[in-house]
């Protein structure tokens, strides 16, 4: 809407380009100051004129052309030109667009493929809250891009290779058993890994043993690979359980081990391109010219490493999917790693290095109430999710004990609460987890949005469904409160686009809160029961659209909406 307005305004205001206008036109925080405003201060500087004078001149021009611009009124106040849209026309064209396919969201990604690398937990290690963040943020960015028409390949790049597995096999042989691992799962693997670290301090020859086991793995020794594979299967069972709880899945699991044999070819390519150097027996790419430590490609024993496996994986993904972008969602602490990897791709002469994006996020801190932990301060994602579902169940028991499908609703609300809480703030910010914030039915929470969805549903149940193409008199939707809701509603496409552009699901989360708030205000102030038939029909149509967008937006974040709660 803003874009359309700017395009039309250019024709009236000579001397200004569409880009300039787009950069200038803003939406005033106070709706009384217009639907849009054009601040004239930058123009005043350039033209060396009084801003109020410029605003008055522009207002006059715009006022004269207001019908063509879709404006009802233009007003200059101080250095601002305040624009009030013609509400009926605005509502009508906006609602018509939204009633089309895909809620009016344009398919700007059609024909383009995006690879997304996220979640990617390490086998034999617990799935902790950090992995929960990458999973939730990654899943949301996948949904957002899919909404825009992109083909998205969801890749789970499991951490399933590295010297730690030599240690683990050594520890298993010494201090565990088949039965113990089968019974204890990752818990047992973690226990023996910790024991290894402790014991190795006293008996350094353990390190040698571990190294020997890893060398066996790299040489495809049958026994070594069998044990490793078994640990992987055990880990996968636990990871899958978490994914199932979240209702999230992947298109492929292609972990680090997949690329362990591709690194010698990579080294050859790098050598041919004059990029490989020896450093203490290892092979590296020198990145000193870019103020980065060298990128390790091959260890002195010829083995691969995290960096080189990532580079090999990228070359493979480009070949397989010809992606227009490849996105990586990991914690901030891996920023340097990805800078090095992307630089290596650039130095190899691949122009698509520009399409590689690292999407970092902040830490989760656990202030406030103590969370249940299974050992020490490691917080398991699964424990948080389970507890959230339990707490949501207890809340339902208290507030709505006769609810039909309590178990399902508790699941949707509990999981939704955690997911929403994770996505509500900018991803780079640290998340401070407190149960009170997460599960509140008021304020900026998932349950609040879900509750609003259910409320909209109950309105529709009471006042009847209207078909999407009923002839509606949109002039009914132009009073202040309703119009404010319509404007928010119609901002959906913009929110989805912004979220994708910034790789920021919080834009959608915040949009949903704004929509829920605008809807609840409308709900309290605009009766449907006592309305005339004409009003009722238009309002019901609006409620229906709001309900659809709430559910759709929740879906983009990974939340499900119960019909009743
Ligand atoms: N496994 C890593 C971790 O748990 C994350 C992997 C991220 N993806 C990648 N291609 N390096 O920290």
Image: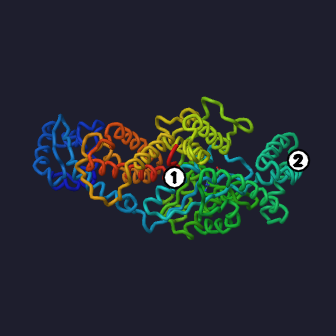
- Comparing 444 with 394, the one in front is 394
Q: Is residue 302 visible?
A: yes
Q: Say which label, 1 or 2, has the lower sequence index.
A: 1
Q: Residue at x 44, y 69 (%)?
A: 111
Which residue is at a point 61% across and 52% down the rendered structure image?
119
Question: Can you tell me whether the CB of the residue at mark 2 lies under 8 Å from the nearest atom of ligand 1?
Answer: no
Q: Tag 2's secondary structure?
A: helix
Q: CA distance from mark 1 to mark 2?
A: 41 Å
Crowding at label 2, few (<14), some or many (≥20) Cα neighbours within 10 Å? few
The residue at the far top in this view is 368
* In-front residue for pair 549/556: 549
Q: Residues within 10 Å of mark 1 (few under 14, many from 20)?
A: many
- The quadrant where residue 530 appears: top left
Q: Are marks 1 and 2 in contact (CB under 8 Å)?
A: no
- Establish whether ligand 1 lies closer than 8 Å to the Cβ of label 1: no
* Residue lying farthest to the right in this orientation: 174
Residue 65 at x, y percent in the picture: 12, 51
Q: Which residue is mark 2?
A: 175
**Side of 444 where 23 appears, left or right:** left
Kindly state the secondary structure of the residue where label 1 is placed: helix
Colour basis:
rainbow
**Displayed quadrant of residue 155:** bottom right
Q: How far from the left and from the top, in percent, is residue 421?
A: 53, 41
Residue 403 position within the rendered picture, expressed as x and y whole percent measured from the top left: 56, 43
- Relative height, residue 231 to residue 481 (above, below): below
Q: Is residue 257 above or below residue 14?
A: below
Q: Which residue is mark 1?
A: 140
Q: Is residue 331 visible?
A: no
- Is 469 or 346 nearer to us in this picture? 469
């Amino acid at each position: 809407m803003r874009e359309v307005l700017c395009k039309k305004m250019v024709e009236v205001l000579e001397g200004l380009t569409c880009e300039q206008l787009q950069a200038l036109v803003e939406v005033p925080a106070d709706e009384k100051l217009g639907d849009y405003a054009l601040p004239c201060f930058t123009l005043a500087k350039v033209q060396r004129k009084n801003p109020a004078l410029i605003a008055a001149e522009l207002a006059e021009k715009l006022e004269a052309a207001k019908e063509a611009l879709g404006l009802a009124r233009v007003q200059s106040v101080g250095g601002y030109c305040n624009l009030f849209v013609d509400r009926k026309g605005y509502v009508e064209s906006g609602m018509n667009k939204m009633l089309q396919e895909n809620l009016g969201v344009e398919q700007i990604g059609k024909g383009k493929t995006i690879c997304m690398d996220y979640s990617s937990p390490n086998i034999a290690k617990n799935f902790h809250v950090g992995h929960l963040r990458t999973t939730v943020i990654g899943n949301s960015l996948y949904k957002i891009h899919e909404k825009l028409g992109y083909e998205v390949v969801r890749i789970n790049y499991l951490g399933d290779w590295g010297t730690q597995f030599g240690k683990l096999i050594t520890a298993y042989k010494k201090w565990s058993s088949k039965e113990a691992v089968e019974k204890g799962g990752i818990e047992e693997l973690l226990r023996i890994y910790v024991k290894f670290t402790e014991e190795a301090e006293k008996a350094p020859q353990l390190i040698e043993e571990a190294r020997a086991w890893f060398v066996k793995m790299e040489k495809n020794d049958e026994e070594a690979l069998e044990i490793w594979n078994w640990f992987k299967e055990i880990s996968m069972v636990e990871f899958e359980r978490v994914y199932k709880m979240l209702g999230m899945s992947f298109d492929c699991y292609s972990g680090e081990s997949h690329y362990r044999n591709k690194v010698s070819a990579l080294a050859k390519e790098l050598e041919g391109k004059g990029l490989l150097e020896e450093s203490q027996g290892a092979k590296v790419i020198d990145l000193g010219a870019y103020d980065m430590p060298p990128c390790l490609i091959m260890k002195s024993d010829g083995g691969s490493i995290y960096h080189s496996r990532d580079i090999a994986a990228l070359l493979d993904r480009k070949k397989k999917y010809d992606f227009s972008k490849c996105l990586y969602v990991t914690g901030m602490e891996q920023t340097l790693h990805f800078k090095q990897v992307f630089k290596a791709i650039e130095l190899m002469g691949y122009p698509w290095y520009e399409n590689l994006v690292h999407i970092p996020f902040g830490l989760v801190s656990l202030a406030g109430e103590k969370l249940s932990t299974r050992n020490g301060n490691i917080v398991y994602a699964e424990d948080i999710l389970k507890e959230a579902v339990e707490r949501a169940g207890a809340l339902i028991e208290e507030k709505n004990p006769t609810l039909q499908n309590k178990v399902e609703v508790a699941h949707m609300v509990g999981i939704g609460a955690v997911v929403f809480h994770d996505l509500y703030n900018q991803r780079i910010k640290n998340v401070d987890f407190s149960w009170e914030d997460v599960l509140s039915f008021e304020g900026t929470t998932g349950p609040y949005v879900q509750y609003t969805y259910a409320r909209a549903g109950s309105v529709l149940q009471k006042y009847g469904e209207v078909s999407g193409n009923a002839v509606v008199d949109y002039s009914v939707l132009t009073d202040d409160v309703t119009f404010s809701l319509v404007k928010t509603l119609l901002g959906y496409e913009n929110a989805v686009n912004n979220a994708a552009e910034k790789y920021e699901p919080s834009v959608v989360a915040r949009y949903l809160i704004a929509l829920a708030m605008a809807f609840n205000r409308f709900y309290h102030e605009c009766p449907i029961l006592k309305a005339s038939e004409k009003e009722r029909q238009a309002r019901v149509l609006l409620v229906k659209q709001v309900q659809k967008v709430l559910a759709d937006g929740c879906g983009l974040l990974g939340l499900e909406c119960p019909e009743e709660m």
